[in-house]
Amino acid sequence: MRVLDISCGLGSISVGLAASVALGEFRGIDMEQLQIDVATSVDQEAGLPNALFQVADALDLPFPDNYYDAVLQRNYCAHSRYECSSRRDVPGIETRRYPGG
Ligand SMILES: C[S@@+](CC[C@H](N)C(=O)[O-])C[C@H]1O[C@@H](n2cnc3c(N)ncnc32)[C@H](O)[C@@H]1O
């Protein structure tokens, strides 16, 4: 299973998510390098080799459509320059996962 965490921040929920798909692929993205550095460090301490973190813009995700089985974002809208009121408003959250994921 492939899981994408959009705007993962410091990875506070990412490690638990990555552990839940230990045999799959977990990726966390955030637009700020500092957040990614901390998330990577936390992940390395937890010893989860299936997790990757990278800088990316939620408004221009560098992944193919329908690649992820599950895509989530938490506490993104209040910190984004993008106006959104529901998960369907967040660019990429519908198209980067499989239908029904
Ligand atoms: C409050 S944190 C949420 C962290 C985590 N999702 C959580 O719930 O603990 C919001 C994050 O959204 C990120 N963010 C804001 N706009 C973004 C964008 N366009 N692309 C990627 N990340 C973005 C910020 O850098 C920040 O780390």
Image (cartoon, rainbow, N blue to C red):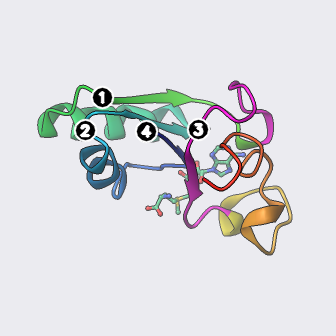
Q: Which residue is the site of mark 1? A: 50
In the image, the residue with mark 4 has its CB under 8 Å from the nearest atom of ligand 1: no
Most extreme residue toward the front, as rendered?
100
Indicate whether 71 appears above or below 29. below
Q: Are marks 4 and 2 in contact (CB under 8 Å)?
A: no
In 3D space, how far apart are the residues under numbered discs 3 and 4 (Cα atoms)? 8 Å
Residue 1, numbered circle: 4
Number of marks in the image?
A: 4
Q: Which residue is the site of mark 2? A: 22
Indicate whether 37 appears above or below 73. above
Q: Position of residue 76 (x, y in %)?
A: 63, 61
As helix, strand or loop, the secondary structure at mark 1 comes to loop
The segment highlighted magenta reads: 59-76
Q: Which residue is the site of mark 3? A: 68
Q: Does residue 6 appear anywhere in the picture?
A: no
Front residue of this view, candidates 72 and 54: 72
Residue 56 lies in magenta, yes or no?
no
Q: Amino acid at mark 4?
A: Met
Most extreme residue toward the bottom, as rendered?
85
Q: Amino acid at mark 2?
A: Ala
Say which label, 4 or 1, has the lower sequence index. Answer: 4
Q: Amino acid at mark 3?
A: Tyr
Q: Position of residue 57 (x, y in %)?
A: 70, 36
Q: Disc 1 vs disc 3: which is toward the camera?
A: 3
Give the left or right position of residue 91, taking residue 58 as reference.
right
As helix, strand or loop, the secondary structure at mark 4 comes to loop
